Image (spheres, grey):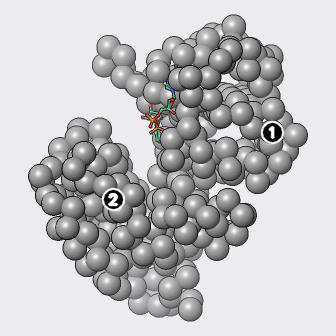
């Protein structure tokens, strides 16, 4: 069994970007910049935003965090995004999700200029992903998973793949990116029948349900690749969707939680922001 070291791979990617960015910063006289908007005071969102800002500092990017009260109107939030859209120091814009219920997430996503949409959620970038046009930005979590596959020499082509979860930020884009790479993909949700049977036959499992202990040792095939995206807190301890102890006895590769997909999501964001910066300075 190989434990996939997402933290290590992410550090390697960030170190490479730091070096490349230093060279371009010297050449073009400005840093890459990320603008982050956080609405309300969701503690998990605060942790994620802090980690993203720390990663920016780590690679030498400029960053700006705009913290807005949970009762901000949609109109005022849009104004903040438009300000970042026009700001030449900002190459990437991220609005931390989830947003309060009175704000339409899709409308917010569509306000961000596609060329600054480093989360890869704008319909234009989603469309580019669907047709395999690599000039757009890929959603950070599945992008991070693909990087792990590349790093560990895991080729999804021809692999029976089961994804648990069909969200716009993980399940659906992960399915599209794996289809693009030749995998045969089934995407499950709470209504799916016989999930355990599907899991047992899967060469690759990606779990993004947010349910602790959802996947047990008996659910996985010998030698399977198991990617655990779930982030759950049980008795104050972080864990994924997969029973790691049981599954790791059987699988070929597995990501731990923490230290697996989480750091790779951040690496994906930094890669996207750097790509946007290069697109602008080298135009
Ligand atoms: P979500 O919460 O929007 O949706 C969960 C999906 O899982 C739904 O499609 C639902 O139908 C499915 N699901 C839930 N329970 C199920 C079950 N018992 N059987 C089958 N399907 C089931 O999803 P999300 O926003 O993609 O987040 C999923 C998990 O991944 C959460 O734990 C979240 O914290 C985590 N996450 C981690 C990262 C990371 O960087 N590691 C990034 C994003 C999300």
Q: Which residue is mark 1?
A: 184
Query: Is 34 displayed left or right of 276 in the figure?
Result: left
Residue closest to the far top: 218
Instruction: Let me know if residue 3 appears in the view.
Output: no
Residue 84 found in image quarter: bottom left
For the residue pair 27 and 222, the one nearer the viewer reads as 222
- Residue at 65% of width from left, 18% of height from top? 193
Could you tell me residue 73's position as x and y percent? 15, 60
- Residue at 80% of width from left, 39% of height from top? 184
Mark 1 CB within 8 Å of ligand 1: no
N-terminal of the pair, mark 2 or mark 1, is: 2
- The disc at residue 107 is none
- The disc at residue 95 is 2
- Residue at 45% of width from left, 68% of height from top? 117
Could you say whether the residue bearing mark 2 is in a helix, strand or loop?
A: strand
Q: Quadrant of the N terminus?
A: top right
- Residue at 32% of width from left, 14% of height from top? 235
Q: Nearer the viewer, mark 2 or mark 1?
A: 1
């Amino acid at each position: 069994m190989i434990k996939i070291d997402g933290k290590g791979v992410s550090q390697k990617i960030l170190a490479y970007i730091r070096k490349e960015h230093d060279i371009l910063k010297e050449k073009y006289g400005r840093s890459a910049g990320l603008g982050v908007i956080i609405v309300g005071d969701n503690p998990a969102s605060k942790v994620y935003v802090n980690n993203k800002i720390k990663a920016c500092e780590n690679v030498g990017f400029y960053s700006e965090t705009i913290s807005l009260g949970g009762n901000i109107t949609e109109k005022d939030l849009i104004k903040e995004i438009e300000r970042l859209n026009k700001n030449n120091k900002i190459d990437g814009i991220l609005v931390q999700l989830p947003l309060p219920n009175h704000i339409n997430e899709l409308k917010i996503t569509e306000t961000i200029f596609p060329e600054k949409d480093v989360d890869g959620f704008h319909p234009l970038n989603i469309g580019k992903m669907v047709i395999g046009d690599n000039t757009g930005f890929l959603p950070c979590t599945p992008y991070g998973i693909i990087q792990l596959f590349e790093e560990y020499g895991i080729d999804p082509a021809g692999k029976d793949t089961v994804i648990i979860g069909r969200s716009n930020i993980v399940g659906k884009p992960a399915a599209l990116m794996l289809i693009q790479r030749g995998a045969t993909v089934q995407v499950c949700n709470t209504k799916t029948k016989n999930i355990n049977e599907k899991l047992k036959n899967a060469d690759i499992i990606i779990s993004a349900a947010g349910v602790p202990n959802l996947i047990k040792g008996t659910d996985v095939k010998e030698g399977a690749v198991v990617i655990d995206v779930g982030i759950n807190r049980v008795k104050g301890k972080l864990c994924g969707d997969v029973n790691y102890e049981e599954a790791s006895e059987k699988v070929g590769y597995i990501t731990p939680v923490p230290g697996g997909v989480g750091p790779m999501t951040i690496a994906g964001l930094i890669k996207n922001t750097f790509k946007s910066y290069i697109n602008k300075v080298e135009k």
